[in-house]
Amino acid sequence: MPDQSVLVVEDTPEIRELVTTVLERAGFTVRAVGTGAAALEEVRRDPPDLIVLDLGLPDADGTEVCRRIRTETPCYVLMLTARAEEVDLLIGLAVGADGYMAKPFSPRELVARVQAMLRFPRTAAPATAEADPVLESVRRLAELEVDEDSREVRVDGAVVDLTRTEFDLLAALASRPGRVLQRETLLREVWQTDWEGNLRLVEAHMSNLRRKLVAAGLHSPEIRTVRGVGYRLVAA
């Protein structure tokens, strides 16, 4: 594993020390701060590969901190929250977080989640098609365009603002239109993990993705749920 850095943003000293210790023992370079303002300073000074972000910070709401982090760096964001309600999860993911863990959490599980996210660092150059990059990278399905080179999604020519994870989910579906992709398949392709505890993440991100596409005026194709299995992208 290459030298990878993690920024821990947690205002409770005991939890901050615990997270720092278990990640350092796992081989990561760890910095730790206790406020949103300090987190943004650290991100601007030296962007980490991943941020473990507490939602309950003393100086700012964690979702707003996440939104501002997203304007500074594409690094992974793993939220820690004592508020496990669905609305908190959806709001957190909507502003660009890649995953969440509810407190109290298992240190072993935390390390496993961080390792899974960083298995494919986001600083790596994207793969490009050798044959014909224009034809290979842009998928057009009725009103929808998914451009993998520019990582843009357009509905009737207008760009839709998606998070990195939402784009990856849509790109996976658009690469196999009409086919059902199991939630476990999406976990492996988008999050590079097989841990079934993450299945709720797929559902929450998919909910946000659908909402944004509908708000952008997309009528066809649409993301359909295959109950108990997964999702597929089909003509409406």
Image (cartoon, grey):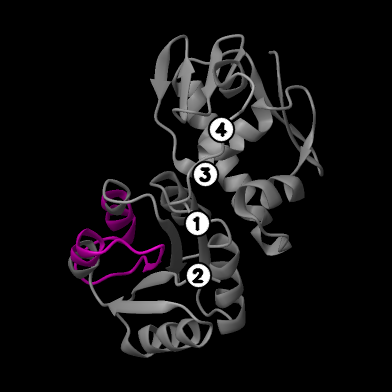
Whether residues under marks 4 and 3 lie with C-beta atoms below 8 angstroms apart, the answer is no
Whether residues under marks 2 and 1 lie with C-beta atoms below 8 angstroms apart, the answer is yes
* 133 with respect to 70 (left or right): right
Residue 146 vertical position relative to residue 28 in the rendered view, above or below: above
In space, the residues marked 2 and 1 are separated at their CA atoms by: 10 Å
The x, y position of residue 109, in whole percent, is 61, 76
Q: Which residue is mark 1?
A: 121
Q: In front here: 64 or 182? A: 182
The x, y position of residue 153, in whole percent, is 48, 24
In space, the residues marked 1 and 3 are separated at their CA atoms by: 14 Å
* 37 with respect to 56 (left or right): left
Mark 4 or mark 1: which is in front? Answer: 4
In space, the residues marked 2 and 3 are separated at their CA atoms by: 23 Å
Q: Which residue is mark 4?
A: 128
Residue 82 figure quarter: bottom left
Which label's residue is closer to the chain start, 4 or 1?
1
Q: The residue under label 4 is which amino acid type?
A: Thr
Q: The residue under label 2 is which amino acid type?
A: Pro
Report crowding for label 2: few under 14, some 14 to 19, many 20 or more residues within 10 A (C-alpha). Answer: few
Q: Which residue is mark 3?
A: 165
The x, y position of residue 217, in whole percent, is 48, 15
If the image is split into quadrants, where does the C terminus sit?
top right
Q: The residue under label 1 is which amino acid type?
A: Pro
If the image is split into quadrants, where does the N terminus sit?
bottom right
Residue 231 vertical position relative to residue 203 in the rendered view, above or below: above
Residue 5 vertical position relative to residue 69 in the rendered view, above or below: below
In space, the residues marked 4 and 2 are separated at their CA atoms by: 23 Å
What's the mark number on residue 2? 2
On whether residue 221 falls in the magenta region, the answer is no
Mark 1 or mark 3: which is in front? Answer: 1
Whether residues under marks 2 and 3 lie with C-beta atoms below 8 angstroms apart, the answer is no
Mark 2 or mark 1: which is in front? Answer: 2
